[in-house]
Image: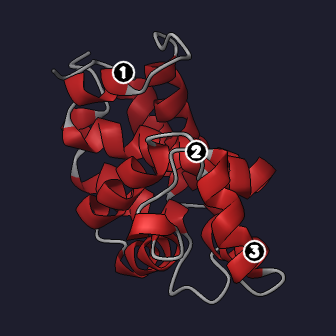
């Protein structure tokens, strides 16, 4: 399912602006995600399965990014978004973010993102102080990464405009 999102003229303007500043890249990314999420029921992310893989990737990355910026530990626990974000980063070619997410995933029981808070506590106790804060900082700011996630997202959106804009 391809959900028409942004009228072509508005998309073109957002895209041109995004070429000029990092803040405008983030604005484009979160505008696309926000429009998709307008129809979200707030409970399950299963609706992402009905979108194109690119649309789903943009939303998953945006939701995880928002969560990581606010409360990283909660964002990786009891949600399907971390695993979806891992697949999204693979799709958009953000290999260093794939590596980071796999590294984080590997500290949990079963080497999978936790479904339950108890699994988070087990991992939290085994990691050095600041481990998850450092991971969150890398993910959100792009510190020590080749480029921030917004740049990978922008490159993907630019390469696949048909997924994000309407015909008129």
Q: Which percent across, then down, holds residue 64?
A: 56, 49
Per the model, the C-alpha gap separating discs 3 and 1 is: 43 Å
Above or below: residue 155 compared with residue 137: above
Task: Name the residue located 27 percent from the left edge and 20 percent from the top edge.
Answer: 166
Residue sitting nearer the eye, 135 or 168: 135
Whichever of callouts 2 and 3 sits on the residue coming sooner in the sequence is 2
Mark 2 or mark 1: which is in front? 2
Q: Which quadrant, please, contains the C terminus?
A: top left
Which of the two residues, 126 or 77, is positioned nearer the viewer here? 126
Q: Position of residue 125 (x, y in %)?
A: 75, 74
Query: Where does the image place residue 162, in percent across and percent down from the top left?
Result: 20, 35
- Say which element carries label 1: loop
Q: Secondary structure at mark 3?
A: helix
Which numbered disc flags the more N-terminal residue, 2 or 1? 1
User: Relative to residue 51, is residue 130 drawn left or right?
Assistant: right
The residue at which mark 3 appears reads as: 125
């Amino acid at each position: 399912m391809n959900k028409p999102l942004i009228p072509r003229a508005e998309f073109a303007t957002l895209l041109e602006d995004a070429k000029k500043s990092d803040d405008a890249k983030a604005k484009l990314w979160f505008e696309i995600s926000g429009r998709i999420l307008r129809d979200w029921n707030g409970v399950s992310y299963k609706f992402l399965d009905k979108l194109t893989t690119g649309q789903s990737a943009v939303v998953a990355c945006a939701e995880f990014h928002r969560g990581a910026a606010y409360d990283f530990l909660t964002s990786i626990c009891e949600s399907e978004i971390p695993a979806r974000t891992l697949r999204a980063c693979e799709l958009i070619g953000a290999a260093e973010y794939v590596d980071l997410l796999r590294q984080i995933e590997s500290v949990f029981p079963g080497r999978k993102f936790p479904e339950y808070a108890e699994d988070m506590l087990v991992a939290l106790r085994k990691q050095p102080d600041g481990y998850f804060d450092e991971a969150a900082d890398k993910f959100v700011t792009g510190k020590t990464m080749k480029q921030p996630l917004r740049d990978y997202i922008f490159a993907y959106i630019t390469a696949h405009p048909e997924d994000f804009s309407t015909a008129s």
